[in-house]
Image (tube, rainbow, N blue to C red):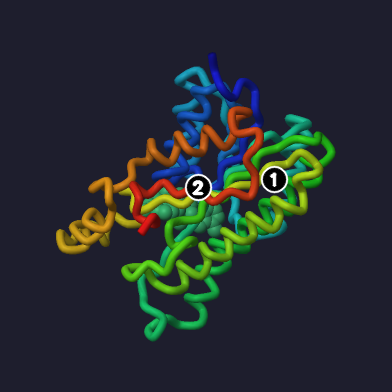
């Protein structure tokens, strides 16, 4: 049986490595996917692929840091579907510079994309989810939102830490309205976000050696965890930070 039949599901950063895997799998599980990304061509291609495979999807080119874009998108979503079941705040970036070398504008950019987008996504979906008395919001943090990670720039780590506590604080405030809010914390997954860095064999070795289970995370590992948090099997979970890290944050 499909796990997400007709669940209206928003996925931001849908055209990226994790976002596209989430979109394809959630569509296979019966969800109607609202794909959000800056990447027009990739977003359109993904929409077409899902529809060709027999699923349902609609692509919205948008900048998740723009409140105007969220307002327009949510108004359209409510008009078209009248409900919102799942929001995955997945869009994110990294600027690979240690704190001493980072410009103020670069710091602000990382914060804007990784934190402001999550704030806006939650802000604009909550009113309808409250009214429905149901909804599952999943925020994509990282292992870097749980521990200081020595290989990762501080701006990224600070932004993902903010996502962790934004998740917990909104989860406790809105639990009484039936809305669940959780965060996911993957270790390194091979996507465009890290491909350049992993092309250096030394960096790749570092990233594998730090994981007790001895491998990188796979997109499927992240997708399976998101699927669990999206569907009713996790109905008693809220405010949780779920590591998908082969034990990396356990020591
Ligand atoms: N890949 C990893 O190792 C890893 C590990 C832990 C957490 N994460 C997190 O997972 C999420 C997805 O990462 P990924 O690895 O798939 O990266 P990715 O670079 O493959 O995809 C990110 C997507 O977000 C989109 N995006 C960026 N800024 C945007 C904006 N302002 N508006 C709309 N869309 C925007 C990009 O166009 C891209 O399609 C991110 O939040 C990332 O921080 C990734």
Q: Quadrant of residue 113?
A: bottom right
The reply, left or right, for residue 36 in relation to residue 144 is right
Task: Give x and y (percent) for residue 206.
Answer: 22, 61
Of badges 1 and 2, nearer the viewer stands 2
Q: Residue furthest front?
A: 251
Q: Assess disc 2: are there few (<14), some (14-19) or many (≥20) residues with their C-alpha within 10 Å of its C-alpha.
A: some
The reply, left or right, for residue 150 in relation to residue 143 is left
Identify whether 102 is placed above or below 167: below
Asked whether residue 192 is in view, the answer is no
* Ligand 1 within 8 angstroms of badge 2 C-beta: no
> Considering depth in this image, is 157 or 41 the residue closer to the camera?
157
Identify whether 246 is placed above or below 98: above
The reply, left or right, for residue 192 in relation to residue 235 is left
Q: Assess disc 1: are there few (<14), some (14-19) or many (≥20) residues with their C-alpha within 10 Å of its C-alpha.
A: some
Asked which secondary structure carries label 1, the reply is helix
Q: Quadrant of the C terminus?
A: bottom left
Q: Earlier in the sequence, mark 1 or mark 2?
A: 1
Residue 242's disc is 2
Task: Give x and y (percent) for residue 41.
Answer: 45, 43
Name which residue lies at 73% across and 46% down: 125
Task: Give x and y (percent) for residue 89.
Answer: 58, 49
Q: Residue furthest right?
A: 131
Q: Quadrant of the N terminus?
A: top right
Q: Are marks 1 and 2 in contact (CB under 8 Å)?
A: no
* Distance CA(mark 1)–CA(mark 2): 29 Å
Name which residue lies at 77% across and 53% down: 173
Q: Quadrant of residue 82?
A: top right
Residue 73's disc is 1
Name which residue lies at 60% across and 33% down: 234
């Amino acid at each position: 049986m499909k796990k997400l039949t007709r669940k209206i599901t928003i996925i931001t950063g849908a055209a990226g490595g994790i976002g596209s895997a989430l979109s394809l799998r959630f569509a296979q599980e019966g969800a109607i996917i609202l794909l959000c990304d800056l990447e027009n061509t990739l977003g359109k291609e993904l929409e077409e692929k899902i529809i060709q495979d027999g699923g349902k999807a609609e692509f919205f080119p948008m900048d998740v840091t723009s409140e105007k874009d969220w307002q327009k998108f949510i108004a359209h979503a409510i008009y078209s579907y009248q409900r919102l079941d799942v929001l995955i705040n997945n869009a994110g970036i990294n600027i690979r510079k240690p704190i001493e070398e980072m410009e103020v504008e670069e710091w602000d950019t990382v914060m804007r994309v990784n934190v402001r987008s999550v704030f806006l996504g939650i802000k604009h979906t909550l009113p309808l989810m409250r009214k429905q008395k149901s909804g599952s919001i999943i925020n994509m943090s990282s292992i870097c939102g749980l521990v200081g990670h020595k290989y990762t720039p501080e701006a990224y780590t600070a932004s993902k830490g903010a996502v962790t506590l934004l998740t917990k604080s909104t989860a406790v405030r809105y639990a009484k309205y039936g809305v669940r809010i959780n965060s996911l914390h993957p270790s390194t997954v091979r996507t465009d976000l890290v491909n350049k860095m992993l092309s250096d064999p030394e960096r790749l070795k570092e990233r594998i050696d730090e994981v007790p289970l001895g491998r990188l995370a796979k997109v499927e590992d992240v997708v399976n965890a998101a699927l669990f948090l999206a569907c009713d099997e996790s109905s008693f979970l809220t405010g949780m930070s779920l590591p998908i890290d082969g034990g990396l944050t356990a020591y």
